[in-house]
Amino acid sequence: MPLTKVATIEEIPSGQAKKIRLGNKDVALFNINGAFYAIDNSCPHRGGPLSEGELEGLEVTCPWHGARFNVTTGAHLCPPANSNVIAYKVQVTGNDVMIET
């Protein structure tokens, strides 16, 4: 799978997220203690921006209606969302954060 550079490690402090554009979709990129994870940015419930949600451990809460997702797998953890989001493989090379496309 090809890798696409989407950010540098300095752009996203630990415990924070950034919305990035990958092809024709928005992806939420998270830094959790120096490990990077990426999932679709749009909550399947009503399209809330997951990159703007509250991050706690490996879970992000949608800022619109409170659905929670595991940022490592994309699994939905509670309603109102009833489906998972896509999780992307992330690789850090030097200071570059890359996502498999």
Image (cartoon, rainbow, N blue to C red):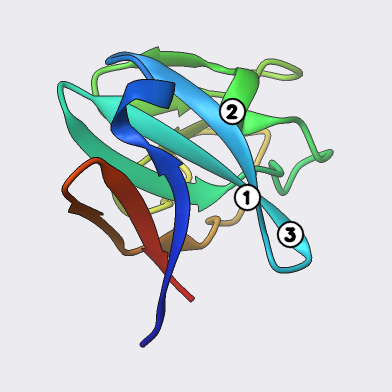
> Going by the picture, which residue comes out furthest to the right?
46
Q: Quadrant of residue 46?
A: top right
- In this rendered view, identify the residue nearer to me: 53 or 25: 25
Amino acid on which the number 2 mark rests in the picture: Ser
Task: Decide: is 83 above or below 2.
Answer: above
Task: Decide: is 45 above or below 34.
Answer: below
Tell me if I can see residue 1 in this picture: yes
Amino acid on which the number 1 mark rests in the picture: Asn
Residue receiving disc 3: 25
Residue 1 position in % (x across, y down):
36, 87
Residue receiving disc 1: 82
Task: Decide: is 77 above or below 13.
Answer: below
CA–CA distance between discs 1 and 3?
20 Å
| Relative to 62, 16 lies left or right | left
Dot 2 crowding, Cα within 10 Å, few <14, some 14–19, many 20+: many
Task: Decide: is 10 above or below 98.
Answer: above
| Mark 1, secondary structure of its residue | loop
Q: Quadrant of residue 14?
A: top left
| Mark 2, secondary structure of its residue | helix
Dot 1 crowding, Cα within 10 Å, few <14, some 14–19, many 20+: few
Residue occupying the point 59% across, 56% down = 83
